[in-house]
Image (cartoon, helix red, strand yellow):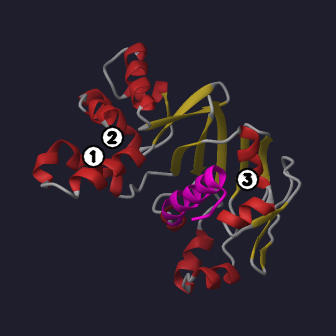
Amino acid sequence: MDAVFKALADPTRRRLLDSLNARNGQTLRELCAGLDMTRQSVSKHLAVLEETGLVTPVRRGREKVHYLDAAPINAIAERWIRRYDRERARALADLKTALETDPMSDDAFVYTTYMKTTPERLWQALTDPAFTVRYWGVTFDTDWAPGSTMIWQENDRKTIDPEQVVLESDPPRRLSYTWHTPTAEWAEAAGVGADVLARLRDEKRTRVTFDIEPRGDMVKLTVVHDGFQPGSVMRGMVGEGWPELLSGLKTLLETGDTL
């Protein structure tokens, strides 16, 4: 936490976080446009934010796209802001409020976690039905080749749609696929009302990407769920669902048990 406080103490780094909070997923060039600083200086500030986990870089072709990861801020909020007088945490209050508010322009959910496992084992946990059913309750019927369709199955319910496809598959480094179709059967099982289901069906389809990087005896997993339109209902749902799901995945891989 000391590193996070130190990172937030610099006004330039707070401006970078504000910029990403307003529009997540920006390149270095785009971030520099809002600052009267050299690219080298901005890169140094971004490196500090990346080191503390406040910013997650994701390679997109030749460019690196930067995403805000609110997990470290939320940890501070849980430990300090709720335990002590908010006035003592005045420097964090505005930023905390901004991060807890779902911004209309935020079209991506980003989450980074570290697991004591291997890239191969993590890949298996993301694709093998014997694993996915234990921490997710879902299995996928697919051969995991790019372009292949995916059938989502939860208990006895199957979600079938030709637009549910594998986008990228580079084991054990990168996996990406389109998100499932919100069907009436899924909504009933999830306790989603007819009005919410109608709104979900009006939204465009999103995608989720898993980037796997070995880090010594650990593995860094970055999950980017993007493509949400402003004010997306699905964005709010996955923002609550992914942290719990990934905690279950981490527990399973590290202990063999489920949450």
Label 1's element?
A: helix
Q: Is residue 245 magenta?
A: yes
Q: 93 and 123: which one is in front?
A: 123
Q: Is residue 72 magenta?
A: no
What whole-number distance in Å separates the C-alpha atoms at marks 3 and 1? 35 Å
Q: Which residue is mark 3?
A: 125
Type of residue at label 3? Ala
Q: Residues within 10 Å of mark 3 (few under 14, many from 20)?
A: many
Residue 167, given in percent of the width and then of the height, sits at 77, 48
Q: Which residues are magenta?
A: 237-259
In the rendered structure, find residue 18 and report the number of the disc placed on it. 2
Instruction: Examine the rendering and report whether any part of residue 163 can be seen.
Output: no
Sequence-wise, the earlier of marks 1 and 2 is 2
Type of residue at label 2? Asp
Q: Which residue is mark 1?
A: 95
Type of residue at label 1? Leu
**Relative to 87, 259 lies left or right:** right
Sequence-wise, the earlier of marks 3 and 1 is 1
Q: Residues within 10 Å of mark 2 (few under 14, many from 20)?
A: some
Q: Residues within 10 Å of mark 1 (few under 14, many from 20)?
A: some
